[in-house]
Image (spheres, rainbow, N blue to C red):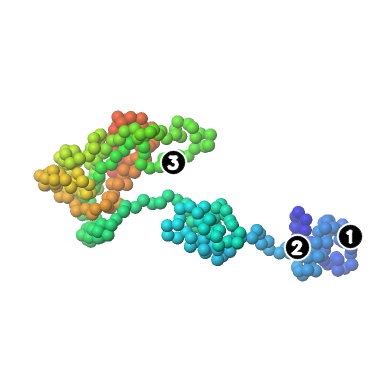
């Protein structure tokens, strides 16, 4: 019907006038439509017996329903990495090959997202049994029991490398501004270690160190930072100390120090950082460190201490 389709009511008028004996030129002049539209309206009514347009089917789909189901099966198990590899495998069963771009579009329509794998601690069968046993051991603990626990951990921070991906909002023309760049180097700029603990009564005193953690350094932390921190908590509450199974935590001199200090240590399951709430705190501290550039280990020490002291106690 030309570049622009005319209204079905006008087509009905065309057919009625034609049946009344008018020729196409007179109908065109009377209804102020082109002669081509008049001709096509009459022809369509004779062929289909209707005045409105047929539903547009659009471009034929590249894959049938059966082929789409086959595509979904190809993305099961470990075969999820490459759309180009899946396109190559799928094309072996298709009469006409399709591109990787089409594969990606179908996957989007099916609800697939191309994302980074979530990292998960590897666990053997023995580790799983030990974690289940730990859960059963503390199954009946109440909220008040967990309020007495000091959850502790050590973490390492780097001058030029952050734990989290650093994302910002910027315009394309701002991509080279200093505040929109993340400093990198062939190395990490140096590292700093930190020990700390959290409980319902607040944070412990942090220990920031530059050397590698070992049994002797950890004993000093227990003797100094931990004991001073426990002293500032409620004295009537007998606190329970949590630590993971790192080698320096289970060494002989540390066990002797724990006995000497009469620390009540919480049993812990192996390979269970996901059970320790302080692990989430390191990520929060790292995001705060990323808010301002750090260029030296001295400034990293200063910023670490500042961010630790400013941790919201209601976090």
What residue would you read off at disc 1?
26
Q: Taking 39 as reference, is 117 left or right?
A: left
Q: Is residue 207 visible?
A: yes
Q: Is residue 44 above or below residue 120?
A: below
Label 3 crowd (10 A; few <14 / some 14-19 / many >=20): few
Compared to residue 135, the image places residue 315 above or below, namely above
Tell me the quarter of the image containing the N terminus: bottom right
Residue sticking out furthest to the left: 260
Do the CB atoms of the residues marked 3 and 2 lie less than 8 Å apart?
A: no
3D distance between C-alphas at marks 1 and 2: 19 Å
* Rendered location of residue 181, percent (x, y): 44, 34
Sort mark 1 into few (<14), some (14-19) or many (20+) by Cα contacts within 10 Å. Answer: few
From the viewer's perspective, tell me whether residue 163 is left or right of residue 178: left
Quickly name the residue at label 3: 167
* Along the line of sight, the residue nearer the viewer: 289 or 140: 289
Disc 1 or disc 3, which is closer to the eye?
3
Residue identified by numbered label 2: 8
């Amino acid at each position: 019907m030309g570049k622009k389709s005319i209204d079905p009511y006008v087509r009905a008028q065309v057919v009625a006038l034609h049946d009344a004996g008018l020729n196409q030129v007179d109908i065109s002049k009377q209804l102020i439509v082109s002669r081509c539209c008049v001709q096509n309206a009459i022809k369509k009514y004779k062929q289909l017996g209707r005045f409105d347009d047929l539903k547009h089917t659009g471009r034929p789909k590249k894959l049938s329903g059966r082929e789409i189901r086959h595509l979904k099966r190809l993305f099961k198990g470990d075969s999820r990495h490459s759309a180009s590899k899946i396109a190559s495998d799928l094309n072996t069963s298709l009469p006409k090959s399709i591109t990787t771009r089409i594969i990606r579009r179908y996957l989007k329509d099916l609800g697939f997202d191309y994302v980074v794998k979530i990292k998960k601690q590897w666990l053997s069968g023995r580790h799983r049994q030990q974690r289940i046993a730990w859960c059963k051991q503390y199954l009946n603990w109440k909220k008040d029991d967990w309020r007495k626990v000091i959850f502790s951990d050590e973490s390492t921070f780097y001058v030029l490398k952050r734990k989290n991906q650093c994302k910002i909002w910027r315009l394309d023309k701002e991509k080279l501004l200093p505040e929109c760049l993340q400093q990198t180097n062939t190395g990490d700029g140096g590292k700093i270690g930190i020990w700390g603990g959290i409980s319902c009564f607040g944070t412990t005193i942090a220990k920031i160190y530059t050397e590698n953690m070992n049994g002797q350094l950890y004993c000093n932390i227990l003797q100094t930072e931990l004991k001073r921190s426990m002293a500032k908590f409620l004295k009537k509450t007998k606190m329970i100390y949590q630590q993971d199974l790192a080698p320096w935590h289970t060494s002989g001199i540390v066990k002797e120090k724990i006995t000497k200090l009469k620390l009540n240590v919480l049993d812990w399951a192996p390979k269970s950082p996901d059970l320790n709430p302080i692990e989430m705190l390191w990520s929060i501290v790292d995001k705060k460190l990323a808010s301002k550039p750090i260029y030296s280990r001295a400034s990293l020490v200063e910023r670490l201490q500042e961010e630790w002291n400013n941790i919201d106690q209601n976090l």
